[in-house]
Amino acid sequence: MPTVGIKRDILFKLLGRSYTEDEFNELCFEFGLELDEVTTEKQQILKEQGGDVTRSSGASDDVIFKIDVPANRCDLLCVEGLVMGLMVFQGKLSIPRFVKSQLDVASLQRLIVKPETARVRPFVVAAVLRGMKFDEQIYNSFIDLQDKLHQNLCRKRSLVAIGTHDLDTVKGPFYYDAKPPNEIRFQPLNQNKEFFATELMEMYSKDSHLKPYLPIIRDEPVYPIIYDSNNVVLSMPPIINGEHTKITLKTKNVFIECTATDFTKAKIVIDTIVCMFSQYCHKPFVIEPVEIINVDVSKYLSPEIIYRSEIVDVSEINRLVGLRESPRSIAHLLTKMCLKAEVLESGEKIRVEIPPTRHDVIHACDVIEDVAIAFGYNNIAKTLPKTATIANQFPLNKLCDLLREQIAQAGYTEVHTFSLCSRDDISDKLKKVTLSSNVVHIANPKTLEFQVVRTTLLPGILKTISSNKQIALPLKLFEISDVVVCDENTDVGTRNILRLCAVNCNRTPGFEVIHGLLDRLMQLLRVSFDVRKEGIGYHIRASDDPTFFLGRCSEVVVNGVSLGKMGVIHPEVLLNFELTMPCASLELDIEPFL
């Protein structure tokens, strides 16, 4: 959940009144937000720098409200959107109407897309804000919103990168192209000379702010570039803008471009920026579109600034939220949430207009949620359920809880390990020749440690022991959790299997210790020992598994079905997990015992 930091005095000035901390906290709660922290710039620096007073010298003592904003409410990531939402919610401001300027297409700015961009960042959108009135507060908010969008919706510029420019310093039409890095040369933001793109990548590899974005295009054969009709470079997305088009407090006309790998996210970003800051234009809430000319010569105007309608049923709203409100009252509640609503002639349905600022509303249920927020969750009357039911613990969970208690009483400590692991953890490290075909793979793993979903609990426990070698022996650990395997017979193509795994690590393997735990579990589960191996009860039979020491491995057979394995872990497996003490383990399916 993103956190927005706003200076209290600026916020109260824009809201038109002052609040106590409790009053503002209550207002945020009613609007569906949370006042997370009240601090100052100096206190923030002291907290981040571990109390180093020298680094906080000169910092402001202005009070800052840090407000938690829902991740899907991009319109609340800046003070402009937050104030607009709160003022409309309180009935002090009517819902603004965002419109595109009615200019002849020939007089619009044009952005021409070149074919090479398809190799790196294929999409681009743009807009112009005319007659902007910047001051220091508006300028800082404008920059801060871009940063907040980059970190959240734009996924650190990997999906969308925003560029803002002083339109009066360049001349259209503009071109969005992709060129080899040794052919790109320009003066980047806050630098006093020109650099080749290759030099910039080297220079910014030591910059803590820009370094994380370099891998997005560093290994690509071409880098994206935006320039004007005079070959003046505006930006090299997603890395840096050009110094020539730098925005200052004197800037009047702003050209905004967003390059992207996700077209939908790009449209959300451009809508959010222009809607939030068009109020400072010469004609408030009027946005000048830009004509985008694609590679296939197709054209469209950006941004779209689309208002769409959603029809919601009054009785359905009342039923789902637990209200008995009239259609007119529900329409008023929706208007408080910046959703213009009108009751249809039938009186049973409401037409809701979704503005371009509310990209979070994608279904009627989102509208219903806003009704609940506007009405106030605390104001919803508590009622008894219409269905009489008696709560009962899920049998499988109840069995697990009982087993956990008994295994803990046997001297074992419960651990919770990651559900994801590397391919090596469940193959090479366990001396398995090949990776099983029923393994669920992660399509885009972020690290080598999380490539697949585990098919056994054993690697996680061995890693835990490896990380706790300093603890006195014996180490007796267990885990009861799910493993996941592929299964074509299920809707999702996978199946969860609940298992129990226990490991004994000591100066000797302690096979008898693990065997004793198995006998205790069978006693608790009221499964008798099958002496004659007739398929009634449980017994163990010799097994050959490369994970275990040869001749020290057995299958656990219950009612004629193999439910797990038990044995002394092979020394090579122990070395693969950086262990030097011998271990014995037991892994068992639990569900068949229900």
Image (cartoon, rainbow, N blue to C red):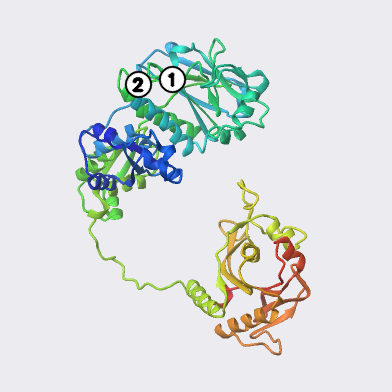
Which label is found at residue 470? Answer: none
The reply, left or right, for residue 398 in relation to residue 22 is right
Q: Quadrant of residue 184?
A: top right
1 or 2: tag closer to the N-terminus = 2
For the point 42% across and 11% down, which residue is it?
A: 107
Q: Residue 9: x and y, percent? A: 27, 34
The reply, left or right, for residue 377 in relation to residue 216 is left
Q: Residue 426: x and y, percent? A: 69, 60
Q: Quadrant of residue 131?
A: top left
Residue 570 in sight? yes
Q: Quickly name the residue at label 1.
A: 247
Q: Quickly name the residue at label 2.
A: 134
Residue 180 in sight? no
Give the amino acid at mark 2. Answer: Phe
Q: Nearer the viewer, residue 8 or 494?
A: 8
Q: Residues within 10 Å of mark 2 (few under 14, many from 20)?
A: some
